[in-house]
Image: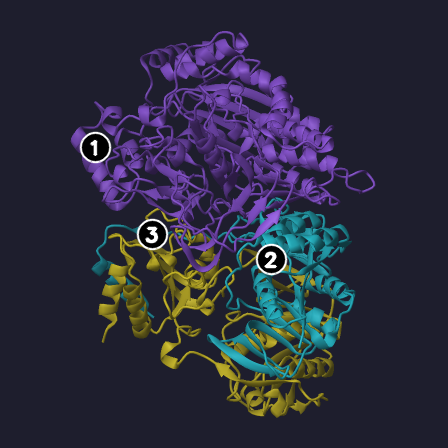
Chain colours: A yellow, B cyan, C purple
Amino acid sequence: MSILFLAHTEPDGTLAKSALESLAATVQLAQSLGTPFTVGLIGETPGPAADAIATCGAQKFLTVSGPEFSQARYATDAAAAEALCRAAAATLVTAPATSRWNRVLPGLAHRLGGRADTHVTGVGVSNGQPCVSRWFYRQRMEAVFTRSTRPWILALEGGIAAPWQGAAGTAHPDAVAVTLAAPRTQVTGFEAPAADQQTIRPDAELLFVTGAGWTKKQADGEVKVAEAETLIREFLRLSRSSLGSTKSLVDLGGEGQSVLPFLSHLNQIGQTGSTPRHAKGLSTCCHGEEPHTVGWRFIGERRAISLDANCGWARGKADILYVADAFAVMAKVNALLAP
Amino acid sequence: MSYQIIVCGSLVPDPLQTLEPVTGPQGPALKNEMMLPSWLDPWAGHALYEAARLAGQHAGSKVWLVSLGPKAKLQQVMMTVAQKVPFELVALDGSAGGFTDASETAAALAEAILAIPGLDLTKLLLFGGWESASRGAGATLQIVGERLGITDQFQGVDSLTLEADGSLRILERVEGGKHQVSVCSAPPAVLGWATGSLPEPRNNPQVGMANMRGIMPALQKAKPSPVSTGDITFTSVTLPTQTRTTQVIKDASPEQIAADIVAWIKGG
Amino acid sequence: MSLVADTAPDAMDRPRMDADIVCVGFGPAAGGFLTKLAAAAFHPDGSPALESPSMPGLPLQVMCYERADDIGFGVSGVVTRAKSLRESFPGLDPDQIPMAAAVTGEKIIYLLDPVGVSRRSFVLRAADKVIRALGGVFGLRHDAIALPWIPPFLNKHGGLVLSMGQFTQWVGSQVMATGAVQIWPGSPVREAIIENQAVTGVRLLDQGVGKDGSPAEGFMPGMEVRAPLTVVADGPVGAIGQQLDLHFGVPEGHHLHDWALGMKFVVDLPDDCQWEPGTVLHTLGFPEPEIFGFLYVHPGRVASMGIFIPSWFDSPVRTAYRYLQHWMMHPYLWRHLKGGRLRSWGAKTLQESGRRGEPLLTGDGFARIGEGSGSTNVLTNSGVDEAWATGVQLADAVIGLIQAGQPFTRENLDATYVKRRRESWVGAEGRVAEKARDGFQRGVVTGLFGTMLAGLTKGVLSMPGRPGAPHTRVPTFENYYAGRISKEDLARIRKDCDTKGIAASGVLMDRVGWPEIPFDGELLVSHQDALLMGGKVQAPAGYGDHVGFLYPEECESCESKICVEMCSGQAITPSENGRPIFDREKCIHCGACLWNCAKAHPHHPEHALVGFQAGAGGLHSAEN
């Protein structure tokens, strides 16, 4: 068995936290299997990144470099990864489940006659063979399984292990040459809300979840979307938390109803939204949206504010349920957080 | 310019149902899988609606929906989907379960696509959801693309603009609430859609009637496609068992609750 | 003419389509109709056997429009003798149909009151005392006794336990696979098109409208489907049935008073539960003497169970949800159910007038079948078999008329469909059952006696009683709780609940001593959480509110607000100004509000102040 750990550099030439987490998981897996492993890096100039993890215990470092590999693009990434896998003669390939790798790995597996598994949340060893766990049906059930086909390529989810930490060194990577046809696709840039408008902060400690209740009639029979918007924006500004939303709330926009203007499907958690990882989660006005709880699968401590004490959404899923009016509570929270 | 837009997508159980795994002779499956209400996979649905919109904007374009699922269930789901937008169905009779292997599903889909009469790769946009609500892997479409020899692939797509010069401008979701912008010079391309920006189209009985003329024959000639779990050996499939002990705080004032929350947020 | 104001303009560009037969609703009646019709539509070689009368040269064009998101949503679970089903499917193997089982055992259980709160009459109290005193003689165990004998007219021996959701899906898939019929779910029919006193087709519901039905963003006028025959199979709350009743009236002496509400849970039974598939239990006596219970065991350790709130339960607290939980927790049932898990739930109105609720079955261009056509047998408590049979009878008639080249006039439909129906077992048994429940107007014991009398004398004898419209009989809180809760307290509770926007029934039941439900998040969940079990209640965008309050100023003075108390989904809530508020996102289309309104319509005293139009969405579960 031979393991290849694949990573790509970030625009600044470093490795992202998710890559270091996957590296740590790979180091552990290699030790459990008693197998050496190789590191394969892709990037414009991946040398410094290789040096940064030079002491990780890899038997060998391979790199594919060049300006065409600075862009996250299927054709070039697949060709680079294919070359690295062939050079390493890998039977087991690990990589962080970044958007860049998720785009490429299943197709890569096909090229190599292997199989890929994505969204892997755990790797282990059973009877001397690697096995993985991942969730099916939108985080509703978790499976543990193994495969017989090699190479077996695994995209490891963030949080799978604590990020690898170790001294930098000199990696002496071997460059792997890749022959490319002229790419038909160019990455021309990125679109993102202005920094002060960005509500999605993957590195935030807290995920703040808003439910459709914010836009419904309140106790006095009035709809208070403007007030809700002010409270939520202010809280996000003060707490630097990441904003998540239930599907019903973001869907309201498409149906022409009053909604919070800064919410988009990118904010949605659960169902067709994301399943983010944060240490803490606070949900507000989500009653009646129990199924969205799957969006909380990877949230550590969870609290909820709801008007209904019997809310099954919170029961068994949140650590604390405050039975209260979120408008009143969040106004006070903001007052306390204000400098 | 006209396009051939092929959407891969199948049915998934209503995600709001109680889903429970059982182990059968073919490996894991859902309890009462055939009884659960099903609908078109939501991401594939977004892909289909975007396909229809684009086809509507470019005269001579056509949309196919290539769907692998149990025939009886497909028929049922199509009665709803067919009312939404015009398309031609290519049906494959097999399991739409989440535990089947993506590479097997991809092989069956690719074979069906290659058999579509008049297929022209220079006009082809291969659409699908960026993952399914069943397997949730985000793998099938890439493998279908590889099998068709398409190496311009995009995942987590929220927007596709077909430019006048024939190029494709594509927005893909990447980390941190951002979109990566790419320009692909021309078809063919593979696009795995996230949610896009279109609301679910209304049920239109006339669209339904028109679609149905092709859907029933497609279902009648649906080829058996016995996809399985492939080389996977499942050790376990379990529901999360951890239930949290929820402390319900009922009679606290907003001030007290706010203080508690702020202490919690600030506490490390 | 509609009870709800028509706010959508008569769109000039309303799309139009022509068909031969348009069928409204897909339940057991339409299932029977379309199964029979589809079987006759093609020759074995695939060539059309029935030619389209309106489009010569084409095969018969049959469209069926179902309002729910999918066929089989929001219907019920039953035990049925399956007489007509077996005629349509000779050699029917229950294993082919998910959740179906042959009846293996049937019991009637009298439940005593283990909590001491049930409102029992003096006679019942005395009887309970005797039963408790002589427990051994009666076989008293777990506060219940099994009746030693099941009257033959109630017996379902040889029948089937079915999930109507799964059964109708099974039927629908077979019918559609023939290619003879198209069944379109998610397509509510707004109204029948009536021209020169003939029905000439239907209009589908407009989409892209606001809450009040007025055109909004993306307005799409509902299509007109013109057809020589409209088959009305839209059940007890169907918009078309209501429209035809209002337009053409009902036959002399017939009425639309009696509508019960059935609410049901589908439960995963605990592992140690001993009930075999096909087990059927009927209960009476608890939680209130007027409330009957039923339990049917499906294969795979699943059971459908629920209660039946009859039209003659004269209580302003006709709430089904909480009563159903108390019923489940009766010791006789709870020992089997504890540790189970709620899979899904549902509720529906049940026609309880039998033959006397029969509307005009036919007219020029239309025919009515199924429950909305008064086919339910109120003696045998059977509806599905009868509904299916009426569908088959109409199909036989339609096939004959097409083959004879005869038009679908009232005369022709009467001479074929109605004649068959009258001469069939459905007609004969319906006549026997006609007065079977009249005795309940005078009390439970009298009612039970009357039922036995009618059943055993084949309808020759019965206990008299005169059913009245709900608005003549729903008592005020003050009357109902006289001697138990003071007038002042009732006023305070009402006001408090109005302010909070919640029904008063829960508070009132607590107050008179009903124990609190110990929610466990599994089988005993809050009413709101039930809306999420087994598929969240759906309310697709772009449709207006299908429930409206026609004279809200009248509602202000309504003391009982039974629409609020009885609402199966807590979709109707009170408000401080006394006007109920409707939330479409919680409505499961049971129709309780429509048929139990405590106030009469000022111009149509047989109708309510609640308008209940065609609507999309509702329960998203096919297990019911």
From what the image shows, is residue A307 above or below residue C240? Answer: below
Chain designation of label 3: B
Q: In the image, C219: left or right of B261?
A: right
Image mark count: 3
Give left or right: position of C344 versus B117: left
Q: Disc 2 vs disc 3: which is toward the camera?
A: 2
Figure check: C587 above or below A51: above
> Which chain is home to disc 1?
C
Badge 3 vs badge 1, beta-carbon distance below 8 Å? no
Q: Earlier in the sequence, mark 2 or mark 3?
A: 2
Pick out the residue farthest to the front.
Answer: C196
Q: Are marks 1 and 2 on the same chain?
A: no
Quarter holding residue B231: bottom right
Q: Which mark is residue B134?
A: 2
Which numbered tag is attached to residue C490?
Answer: 1
Callout 1: helix, strand or loop? helix
Q: Which mark is residue C24?
A: none
Badge nearest the viewer, 3 or 1: 1
Q: CA distance from mark 1 to mark 2?
A: 52 Å
Image spot of residue A53 (x, y percent) = 55, 85
User: CA separation, marks 3 and 1?
Assistant: 33 Å
Q: Nearer the viewer, residue C359 or C143?
A: C359
Quadrant for the N terminus of chain B, please.
Answer: bottom right
Closest to the observer, A111 or C545: C545
Q: Position of residue A45 (x, y in %)?
A: 58, 92
Where is the C terminus of chain B found, in terms of image quarters?
A: bottom left
Q: Amino acid at mark 3?
A: Gln
Image-based side of C549 in relation to B49, left or right? left
| Labels 3, 1: one chain | no
